[in-house]
Amino acid sequence: MAASPPQSPITVSVHCAGNVSPDVARRRAGGGRALVVDDEADADVYNPVLSPDGTKLAFIRETLTTPESAPRMTLQLYDFGSGAVTGVADGWDRWPTSLAWLPDGSGLVVTADDGGRGPIFTIDLWGQPVRLTADDAAYTDVRVAPDGESIYALRASYEAPPHVVRVDLRSGEITALRGPDTLPELPGTLTEITARAEDGSTVRSWLALPTGAAPHAPVPLLLWVHGGPLGSWNTWSWRWNPWLLVAKGYAVLLPDPALSTGYGQDFVQRGWGQWGKAPFTDLMAITDAAVAQPEIDPKRTGAMGGSFGGYMANWIAGHTNRFDAIVTHASLWALDQFGPTTDAAWYWQREMSPEMAVENSPHLYVADITTPMLVIPGDKDYRVPIGEGLRLWYELLAESGLPADDDGKTDHRFLYFPDENHWVLKPQHTKIWYEVVTAFLSEHVLGEDVALPEILG
């Protein structure tokens, strides 16, 4: 006989481990009863979903990090009758990103990053994940139909923006549902390349090629580093969209270096606390593989990134002069300054020991920067505070290997958004962002002068 579900309301959508005590959880619940499903001090739990019969709770457990150890994400199951917490799919070397119950309570439907994709998996409670979707897409907002026959979700990839689909739970067959508009036509094609890293690991990347790219008409390359750093280039973004640059004639490289998700725990761990090592050498290895493609012109290259990607852009600038131009957006510059001032200092300082900050801080290599850089901060950015961008700009002009001349002229550029935060959210500002970025790249990668937006004077 199944255990009876609890009769009084329980708040489960709070962090009740790691950073929040049971008493705090109860206060957040407004005096109600807070369920502490995992009271260990070395983990957080989140995304709780109640089983259809109310007897179990599935959730994601994330271990707290240390300077030496990356987080580990696992699926867990809480039984209301016994109070026991057990693992689901123990040993699965992927990080779950969302979960839902099958209507009969026999298992879970889970999404996870996996090799540059974000498939849907089904998991029997006492078994291992079975991949349901076999395409190159990433799935979000998964909803299981009440009859247990199908799943509804948003499907996206670098070939298509999010659109609603139905997935057959038995066959995995995908049916696109009618949407408000047709999917956009792309200005190029998407392919995939890999490279061998220094330690023998495989580094993979999407490569978006403009229409017309061919060995007899090679195109310039733009390396675009993702943020996070715990993430993957695996889905469409309206903000960071490679096709806008592809439309300008660039091949855009979207790599997943060390610290990226979807390649197993060891792939994350190999870059943990060592941002300037494996992540950097991985990026250089995959760039080598890209410029070896016959459609790419190896003599015309640029690099760019935002947030952690901006950190990597700064690190790249101080460690190689192979690129003709570098764009750095909302980027970490001086790690000893960033760690205590970000709005998530409690998180970053678990990894950023004083030794890590010294060994991996881009600002210590400013004198080695000889590549023109475009620096883009937002004044309302609390994740990477404005001081990072201001200090980067000042030190580029004063100390880089490409300083300002006596008249204050420099090849470095600075684009400042006084009312944007970590992201550029206003449509008119996004347009300015891309116009300035493409003008800067055109000048230094293509050798062409492109006018800046009139609003900038």
Image: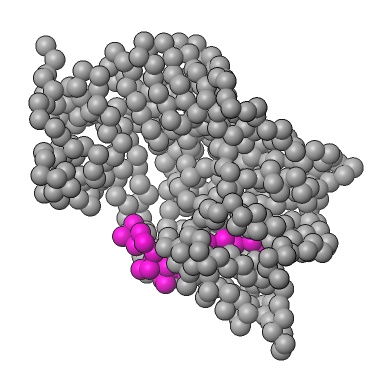
Residue sitting at 62 percent across and 36 percent down? Answer: 158
**337 inside magenta stretch:** yes
Q: Quadrant of residue 124?
A: top left
Above or below residue 90? Residue 450 is below
Residue sitting at 49 percent across and 17 percent down? Answer: 167
356 and 408: which is toward the camera: 408
Q: Describe residue 16's horizontal placement relative to residue 277 as left or right.
A: left
Residue sitting at 19 percent across and 22 percent down? Answer: 54
Q: Quadrant of residue 349?
A: bottom left
**328 inside magenta stretch:** yes
Q: Quadrant of residue 324?
A: bottom right
Residue 291 visible: no
Q: Describe residue 351's horizontal placement relative to residue 251 as left or right.
A: left
Identify the residue at the far bottom of this view: 406
- Stretch in magenta: 326-347
Q: Position of residue 390 (x, y in %)?
A: 53, 74
Q: Describe residue 34's horizontal placement relative to residue 454 as left or right.
A: left
Q: Position of residue 206 (x, y in %)?
A: 64, 39
Residue 147 visible: yes
Q: Position of residue 277 (x, y in %)?
A: 52, 58
Above or below residue 174? Residue 428 is below
